Amino acid sequence: MAQKPPILMAGDTIGIVTLGSPREAEDINRNIAFLQGLGFNVVLGDNVYASSGFLAGTARQRASDLMNMYMNPEVKAILPTRGGTGVQGILPFLDYSFIAQNPKIISGYSDITILLNVLYELSEQITFHSLLLLDFRPTTPAYNFDQFFTATSTLLSPRIIENPTGMPALSLIGGNVTGPLVGGNLTSFVGTLGTPFDIDTRGKVLFLEDVHEPINTIYRYIEQLRVAGKFLDCLGIVMGECSDCPISYQKSYSDLINEEIVPLGKPLMTNVATGHGRYKAALPIGAVVNLNTYENTLTVLEPTVSVE
């Protein structure tokens, strides 16, 4: 069973890092001010504002910032400023044994999901497919904050992952399976196939989402995962949104799920509010969940943080 990081409390310190693509300093500072307004202290990585083309500094610099947050005993949670691209580059430079001995809340989505799953697999800690720093702003729906803080600041268990009102999750293939949850951004995972950081779906509930990719590209990525055995190995499948994914050749994301995922025969839930869409459910990577598509429920069966 994966380790649970210590619970996040008001007044705690949150470490801010940029692990992939850069963000504008003005935007970062605005989000930090909002976070401080919630009562948290903030520590910044040395390369938070770095920018070198589509990357925020070298891979070693970005990895060093993350390791410094794990080595800082004052830091209780880590928030990347954004995802983008480049997170895969930091993975060879992380000390997974040290991280395993010092689990902390780390949250994000998009390209950050590569890191979330690798930390679960190599450091055996629960991580959170949830908010990035960029989501800490006044226009973020209350649903997103409720999800994040329920997962990171309470011991609530069991916790049913419920979509916001008016956005029903849909179960397409019946089944009832229980296992650790893995997954996240489809595009990012395809980039790790065949590497030491390949996602392990064996005996797991797998969820996927994406953004801004045409449906023929999503088809290609799903086929890559299928041929790599990732669907064969998993217990069940949860499909999040494909936000702003344009229809290709009269095929929609829904068409693709019905034609490519449904025939796999695995318990299947779709339209889960997670990832790049407006609403973001907090899905704990590595936590044991129950996917019951007869009842149309996805339930986290254990607390995802601990009391020191």
Image (cartoon, helix red, strand yellow):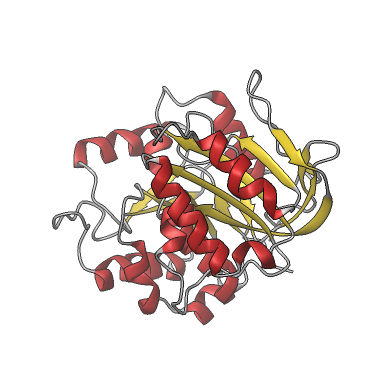
User: Which residue is painted at 47% across and 33% down in the image?
Assistant: 277
**Quarter containing the C terminus:** bottom right
The image shows residue 241, relative to residue 141, as above or below, that is: below
Whether residue 82 is visible: yes
96 or 248: nearer the eye? 248
Whether residue 78 is visible: no
**Quarter containing the N terminus:** bottom right
Q: Position of residue 156 (x, y in %)?
A: 76, 43
The image shows residue 31, relative to residue 112, as above or below, that is: above
197 or 306: nearer the eye? 197
The image shows residue 59, relative to residue 238, as above or below, that is: below
The quarter holding residue 181 reads bottom right
User: Which residue is painted at 42% across and 35% down in the image?
Assistant: 135
- Outermost residue, left direction? 52
User: Which residue is painted at 51% across and 48% down in the image?
Assistant: 12
- Outermost residue, top direction? 166
User: Which residue is painted at 21% across and 68% down in the image?
Assistant: 58
221 or 191: nearer the eye? 221
Q: Position of residue 172 (x, y in %)?
A: 73, 38
Q: Position of residue 217 (x, y in %)?
A: 39, 49
The quarter holding residue 233 reads bottom right
* 169 sits to left or right of 130: right
The image shows residue 104, relative to residue 157, as above or below, that is: below
Q: Position of residue 261 (x, y in %)?
A: 63, 49
- Outermost residue, front direction? 249
